[in-house]
Image (spheres, coloured by chain):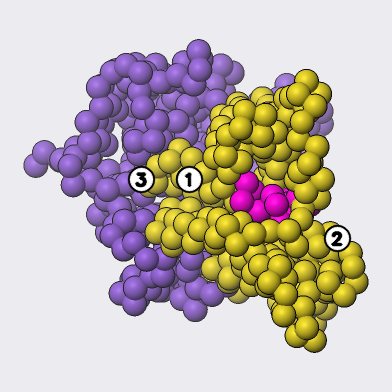
Chain colours: A purple, B yellow
Amino acid sequence: MERRALVELDKVTCRYGRDPVLVNIDLRVDAGEFIGVVGPSGSGKSTLLKVIAGSVEPIAGRMARAPDASFGYVPQVETVNWYFPVTVREVVLMARMDGRVVPWTSKAERAEADEILDRLGLGGLGDRHIRELSGGQQQRVFIARALLRRATLLLLDEPTNGVDVRTRHDVMHLIHELHHDGIAIVLTTHDLNGIASHLPQIVCLNREVIATGPPRQVITPEVLERTYGAPLEVLSHGGMPVVVEQYPELDEEDATAQPLREDHHEHLA
Amino acid sequence: MLEPFDYGFFRHAISVAVIAGALCGLVGTYVVLRGMSYIGHGLSHAIFGGAVASYALSVNFYLGAGAWGLVSALLIQRVARRRTIGADAAIGVVTSASFAIGIAIISVTGSFTRNFEAALFGDVLGVSFGDVAVVAGVALGTAVVVFLRYRQLLFATFDPDVAEVSGVRTGVVDVILAVVLAATITATMNVVGVTLIAAVLVIPPVIARLLTDSFHRMLAISVATGAACGFIGVYLSYYLDWSSGATVVITAATLFVVAWVVSALRQRAATPMGALEVH
């Protein structure tokens, strides 16, 4: 059965001032799809999410969105002002911009917000200030806000950036659950091994799309060198690609140390 | 205790100080949370340039100074969007240039000596019923705008990028805030004066921020604190025979110290508690 496209970019180009940020981007996101976007800093990952969400207008190319598609955008937690005086519930209810004119929220809106908070494991924390939460909880507050928009496509900008391994695991588990519930996901990440290699589909981006496909096909030394401009070794571990960064000077020093354990890997072409 | 209220000028003064205090507390909340506290200081100087120009051109003060202030506020927002410059530098450039134009006009025309001190230091005891009506009108208009655009203003202030993505027209919100801010400063200039207006715009929201972590409570506390500062400041100035504008600001500063101590004591009394992780 053919899947329904939520958004389709055809040769889309964007600029900030005179600098091109995205060039000739072709991308299609279907309902229920799960895509990871990887690339170096400044490669246009966040801009791509904003183009999909409609807040950045392309200067060239064609862009189509399904009329019934709704987008939920989850920002990088580093960009959030954690000292802003807002409670968890106030942040989540920001999703409701339209409809009611009066400042206060309706009973139904508050009930819906609390239901989503419960679902994301944040029940009872609605009156807390956002700074009082743990890293994983903070990320979930912004996912809750996106869900209250009844998003059919969640756009997450580096959702696991700067968090520890356990929090990363919790956040990815939640995103996976939302995907299972039928929500399409597009996330950006710098984490090739911890996140990207586990996703069904990834896009390697460096102002233009370098490669698209399942990680096993896309995470190769050749594609990574074109994406990041640096040579990277790729091993296979249990059928999954593992990217190995090499620092010759450090590795030379380390060569005198005893290996802790020998793993059996095969090199990917 | 009620003796000053026997005088009409005092009733006008205390009414305008209370309304102006509440208005500045309301608008100041957005100003402080946008990290633009210096804009009150800068824009009041810019509007001073507009006031001088209005006087020299025989244009109505509120119209001339208000329009001048609005253009200055929009210019600040425009310049501040260039990330290489930033909001603080944009305020410095636009407002000092505007102030300088006012000074240049005075030096050429030799006029505006009559109201010069009133504009700089405020003359709350000299306000007329018309002045009270203007401040009340601006306060009412601002309250209506904040009421109708509460959600958009909050989202655009907290998280402008995501607000834009979520359908809030942040450019429109910025213009609304510029209009409200220019109108507020123009209307309240006669009450506390150019030199002290930044304080009444900034201190009440800062006091409120020390006392609450919730946005809507901060807004309410800031409005109430601004009104209280206006009332107490003007009342005390009658007995102390101090400048009314300065007394309002000293009252606000004193309340800030009290709020700061209360906030510090509350923090110390709070049981140290880590974030509760729920699975």
Residue depicted at x 54% and y 75%? A127
Q: Nearer the viewer, mark 3 or mark 2?
A: 2
Sooner in the amino-acid sequence: mark 3 or mark 2: 3
| Left/right of residue A172 with respect to residue A160 in the rendered view | left
Q: Foreground: A126 or A235?
A: A126
- Give me the chain letter of mark 1: B
Residue depicted at x 49% and y 48%? B156
| Residues at circles 3 and 2 in contact by the CB criterion of under 8 Å | no
The kind of secondary structure element at disc 2 is loop
Q: Which residue is mark 3?
A: B167
Extent of the magenta region: B185-199
- Give me the chain letter of mark 2: B
Q: Position of residue B229 (x, y in %)?
A: 74, 69
Q: Amino acid at mark 3?
A: Gly
Residue depicted at x 36% and y 27%? A57
The answer to whether marks 3 and 2 sit on the same chain is: yes
